[in-house]
Image (cartoon, rainbow, N blue to C red):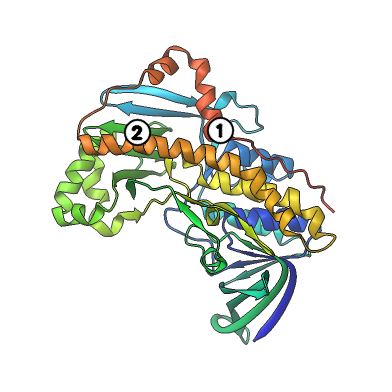
Amino acid sequence: METLSTTCVIVGGGPAGMMCGYMLARAGVDVTVLEKHKDFLRDFRGDTVHPSTLQVMQELGLLQDFLKLPHTKIRTGTIEIGDERFTIGDFSRLPTAAKFIALMPQWDFLDFLAGQAKKLPNFHLLMQTEAKDLIAQGDRICGVLATGARSVGESQSDPKKVNLQIKAGLTIAADGRHSTLRDKSGLKVQDLGAPFDVLWLTLPVLPGDPADLIGKVRDGQLFVMIYRTDYWQCAYLIPKGGFDTIKADGLTKFRNRLKSIAGFAAGRIDEAIRDFDQVKLLTVTVDRLEKWARPGLLCIGDAAHAMSPIGGVGINLAIQDAVATANILSPVLTRGVPTLRDLRKVQKRREFPTKVIQAFQVAAQNILLAPTLAAMRTPKPPAILRLLNAWPWARQFPARFIGMGVRPEHARLPKR
């Protein structure tokens, strides 16, 4: 078994792990990030980069180069209920450097962060390295056991797996809603429930299509279309556990359901959805840890609190966790090993925003989404939507909630 040592080991090379690793390394902390895959390519991962994240990129001096990457700007959000259309959010009024949501493949975002981080001598990224367990000394976590790939000879195509023992003063679990480290930690999870799942699919973009974020509600169906320049990334909401029933009913019936809700894109359904292999299931979970830390271990992002896809804010919240973690812990890590009290400061800072957003999501899914899916009819538009149509200036408030979140974080670390 090979033994490595680092000041901080971060498990998970997603948005939270990469942002936290970059910011800690920038502050002078020796950081090792583990990513179990060989690259960042994933299907149907969240591709939204919120204004609050773009603001952090601006504060780190990265925004100008970041926006050179191909992306789509979403400045407004709309919802169609039956035949009525409402604009529900206007990001152009936000007090941020970038007044829009940037839609970009998540692998491009992560590749960009990795490229910037690799310029720092104390940042180490180990791809194809999967954490399997925690290393404990008494009650304190002091690193992880992992399996990693090491190349044989000069060929990168013939990796040989090796067992790794990575010792660290701090271990950060940023390995998502199915976190291995969270499962191994003994920390208790509170399940808040989710009465729906999501089917992801893509439809082609044609000339004349709007460049927008569109939600559609009709006849008990809910459909979201996200403009991605050359395709629409679409989410079709279904009752919890209902995908097997949909498949049993057959592809033709499913296509007809999509056609009834897809509006201007209805004519593209048959060609785009040839079989159920082109439909991906997201099993929705909403939960959070009662305590995010134990001595030597801190959970952030989805490992600490799995979010509903409502509002697309999960990535935003995870990155905000990462920024807060770096702001709070980098001064401690440059001096020594953080105490449990230090780690709890991160939860104290980020728990309130998490609870507020999850409360909003649970209320939306229980009061609006689940009844709509069960009723099989078009609901009456809420009065708040008519208010937003009548007073456009008020659209900044839902945009602020989605785009900036509650208690947005700012990068406050000087580069060393």
Residue under label 1: 100
Residue 264 as seen in the image, left or right of residue 311: left
Residue 304 as seen in the image, left or right of residue 330: left
Residue 55 as seen in the image, left or right of residue 372: right
The kind of residue tagged 2 is: Ile
Q: Position of residue 324 (x, y in %)?
A: 69, 47
Name, please, the residue furthest toward the top.
Answer: 390
In this rendering, the answer to whether 169 lies above or below 102 is: below
Residue placed at 54% from the left, 57% from the top? 303
Q: Dot 1, how many residues are within 10 Å of its Cα: few (below 14), some (14-19), or many (20+)? A: many
Residue placed at 48% from the left, 57% from the top? 177
Q: Is residue 66 visible?
A: no
The dot on residue 367 is 2
Q: Dot 2, how many residues are within 10 Å of its Cα: few (below 14), some (14-19), or many (20+)? A: few
Q: Nearer the viewer, mark 2 or mark 1?
A: 2
The kind of residue tagged 1 is: Phe
The answer to which image quadrant residue 118 occupies is bottom right
The N terminus, quarter of image: bottom right
Q: Position of residue 352 (x, y in %)?
A: 59, 40
The C terminus, quarter of image: bottom right
In this rendering, the answer to whether 388 lies above or below 273 is: above
